[in-house]
Image (tube, grey):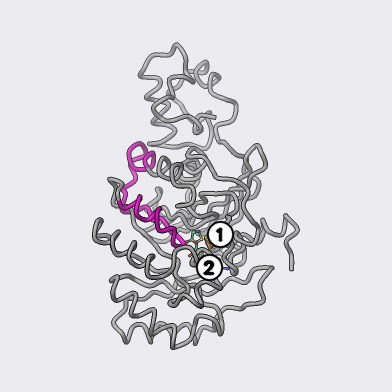
Amino acid sequence: MPYLHSPEDLGDLLDGEPAYRVDQLRDWLYRTPVLSVQSMTNLPNQVREKLDRQLWPFDVELEQSADGGTTRKWLFRAPDGAAIESVLMGYPRRATLCISSQAGCALGCTFCATGQFGFERNLVAGEILAQVAYAQAFLRQIGMPGVPDHLTNVVFMGMGEPLANYDRVREAIRRMIDVMGISARSVTVSTVGMVPGIRRLGDEPWQVSLAVSLHAADDELRSTLVPINRRYPLQELEAAAAEYFQKKRRRLSIEWTMIAGVNDTSEQAVKLAAIATRLRAHVNLIALNPTPLTRETASSDSRIKAFARELGQRGVNVTVRDTRGRDIDAACGQLRVLAGKRGLTA
Ligand code: SAH
Ligand code: SF4
């Protein structure tokens, strides 16, 4: 499975072939990805046969489409049974892929389906990168109606906490930027607030975008929703985010899942506005997608609009995010299909 090899070590797979053949293979894997080895047209048969029978390090267990073919969700399955989920969202001038960094997640945020399902294992760099290459191959060879034929954005908002799997995520990002040619600015790492990871990412040479999943603007409330807040409380998180902004000069985003009666109050809006202003961050509001194990419900549309207005009045840039692919449970961080499979129904 060539994606499990470092792009620099592909020669090991094509023992005895000239260097230009290795370069051709690297181009097929990273520059112009294709869905199957058969499409690697300039490689002679004997070279294609040297590659593993399987190009991808996972099987496509489920592929679902929604929103008139502009949202697509894949549930990939690694040979050891680990589930990997990616969602591709197409727009007239954008194609954003949401990828997973871990199978499951150990951080247990109460409202998150992935957190409820527990931690299975870290994904390796090749498994993270292969999600990007697969979507790129899909856009090139099959495509979506009215959507660019290549990825414009990659967001780490699928399963798992990317900064809890730092080294492998780092290597996947390196391959995206240095080998695939994706620009660092179009890659967004979303974190629930792993402070040491934010610091390390700030020291990397890339201008990767950072999204902080805040959800609550005081420690008391945040610790009930996001257990890791007890380890890295808000003040430390805000300091690390501010430092990231200073180092990279990339606008931060704050993610805020709207939960009825919990974090959609005016009091939270006021506190959030203060944090967002200090960080000069953009706030994304997203309605909670109900999960099997919580009784919480999403804030109403009118409450979300009012909350957005309260932020806006305080000078904060705010977007209410659309919930793509609701009918296929494809919103990022939403893995009910998977949860259902594991018997985690309410
Ligand atoms: N672990 C990282 C990235 C994966 S989660 C993080 O937490 O940021 C990606 C996003 O989905 C996060 O902003 C998370 O808060 C959000 N999310 C999780 N569960 C959700 C739900 N039930 N409804 C809406 N958004 C959810
Ligand atoms: Fe993990 Fe992010 Fe879900 Fe929290 S919201 S449990 S950090 S995937």
Which residue type does callout 1 highlight?
Leu
Where is residue 71? Give x, y as percent.
52, 59
Secondary structure beneath label 1: loop
Q: Is residue 67 visible?
A: no
Pinpoint residue 297: horizontal percent, then vertical percent. 61, 78
Quadrant occupied by the C terminus: bottom right
Which class describes the residues within 10 Å of circle 2: few (<14), some (14-19), or many (20+)? Answer: many
Q: Which residues are magenta?
A: 174-202
Residue 45 lies in the magenta stretch: no
Q: Quadrant of residue 266?
A: bottom left
Nearer to us in this view, 283 or 326: 283
Is residue 186 within the magenta segment? yes
Using the image as rendered, state which of residue 104 and residue 61 is in the foreground: 104
Q: Quick check: marks 1 and 2 in contact, CB under 8 Å?
A: yes
Mark 2 vs ligand 2: CB under 8 Å? yes
Q: Is residue 109 above or below residue 342?
A: below
Task: Name the amino acid, label 2.
Answer: Val
Q: Is mark 1 within 8 Å of ligand 2?
A: yes
